Amino acid sequence: MSISLKGDQPFENIPSVKAKALRINLNEHIYGTFAEIGAGQEVARHFFRSGGASGTIAKTMSAYDKAFSDAIYGEEPDNRYVSESRLKKMLSHEVNLLESRMDRKEHPNKMFFTYANTVATIDFAKKYRGHGWMGIKFQTDSSEDYSEILIHVRFNLFEARAQQEALGLMGLNLIYGAYYKHNEPRKLLKYLYDHLDPGAIEIDTVNFSGPLFKDVDNRVMSLELVKNGMTEAVMFGPDGNNILPARVLYKKNILAIRGSFRPVTKVNEDMFDKSIEIMSHEQDFDENKHLTVFEITLSNLKTSNGDVNELDFIHRATLLCSLGLTVMITNFKEYYRLAEYFSNYTQEKIVLTMGVNNLVEIFDEKYYSHLSGGILEAFGKLFYKNLRIFLYPMKVNGDIINSNNLHVAPRMKNLYKFFKFNNKVIDIFGFDKNLLDIYSQKVLQMIKNNEEGWEKMIPKKVTKLIKEKKLFGFKEL
């Protein structure tokens, strides 16, 4: 016989912290361990304080000392202990202990779980805010395999104790959500902030896996984080799983290409190829230290009524991932915010590849009225020492427009000249002039209308996928 936890009735209002912990504790079938490193046992204490924990908690531990932690979970090759790798080892180790020490014949109805976190709170000098990984490996049916939720958080509070308390609340919400909101993963994400100030803690990576989440697309969950204001930027790799921006951007030379990619066209492909060609000819180019990011802004995903068309987003993401690309979704409408974000993680070279129309917009003062320093403040962040713009030309009335003949507002001419003559704006040459007549909106309309010729405007692999998966409204004639 197995016991199952399905479709539990929600509370009418947000349950209190004590009510959440007590509901877990009073469920005789939920049983597990807590393993917390770096910020004390902040999550476990909520369950002890609420009462009735003896039937729920098998063990709590804090392997705080590095040597002791290594003896339990093994060493980390890169010597980084606040990491996803460490978290996964902790979860697997503790679940294996539960399974080996608790005889299923004697406890056929127990639904095991392990909650773990590995965290670094703010340092004494308050130079580094702190961050951490937390996750839960759990069952909602004693006969089923385990499901897993992993999240990465960044602290925005300036006191270690406040960070610890925020961690404790979010950990409690995660465990509660895993058991009582797993069938609504979008709501589960929102409920992680129950009883928390949204500005206290940021979630910038989340991944769901296992049988309970077999239908969950982690790219959509990533999008939810940005939509809900839980973070301003998320990334996912070619496999569709979310990745921690700080980890992949750290000390990398970055090439970022912003676009709608609706769909990816030969123009996008050429922008990428020509940019890589320029960078690869530079003396200090190192492919192992390079990362290319295809960025889509949240505003670019919104429809005319302000909603996000998720099916359309998935179509774009599917195509980009199929090309082996790393994708970034941001809430950075202005380029200077994107540049500022990258500079938080790397002091190496940053290249933004863009079209002429995008560069002209950058020099439009109306986008910086909200800044006390106006456009000069924005440009101080945009054109920091290692950032350059690779400029892809455009065709206007048969003329090729590049950095030498584009027009900015009269007030901006001297500012533009300053950046151009300091080699911050570099023209892309060697392009195919025929590609300048390709526009993604035109291609999209041709696909929807079953017009001939759109296949010539996009990469072959993209064409094949659009037809196979019936993307962007494609229909067989």
Image: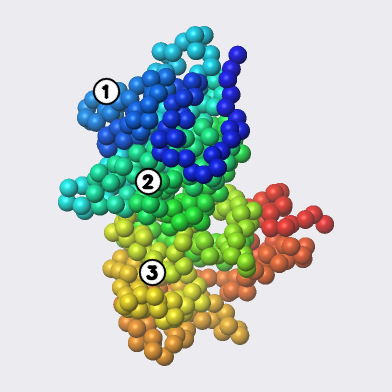
Would you identify the image quadrant in which residue 17 lies?
Answer: top left
Residue at the outermost bottom position: 410
337 to 410, vertically: above or below: above
Residue bearing mark 3: 336
Give whichever of discs 3 and 1 has the lower sequence position. 1
Say left or right for 104 vs 370: right
Q: What element carries label 3?
A: helix
Residue bearing mark 2: 153
Q: Residues within 10 Å of mark 1 (few under 14, many from 20)?
A: few
Q: What residue lies at 45% left-to-right and 16% top-to-bottom?
A: 99
Give whichever of discs 1 and 2 has the lower sequence position. 1
Q: Which kind of residue does numbered mark 1 sit on? A: Ala
73 to 430, vertically: above or below: above
Say left or right for 205 vs 69: right
Residue 71 circle label:
1
Q: What residue lies at 53% left-to-right and 65% top-to-bottom?
A: 299
Q: What residue lies at 46% left-to-right and 67% top-to-bottom?
A: 333
Whole-number angstrom distance, CA of label 3 to CA of label 1 = 46 Å
Q: Where is residue 175 in the image (x, y as percent from the top left)?
A: 45, 34
Asked if the residue at tag 1 contacts the one at tag 3, i.e. Cβ–Cβ closer than 8 Å, the answer is no
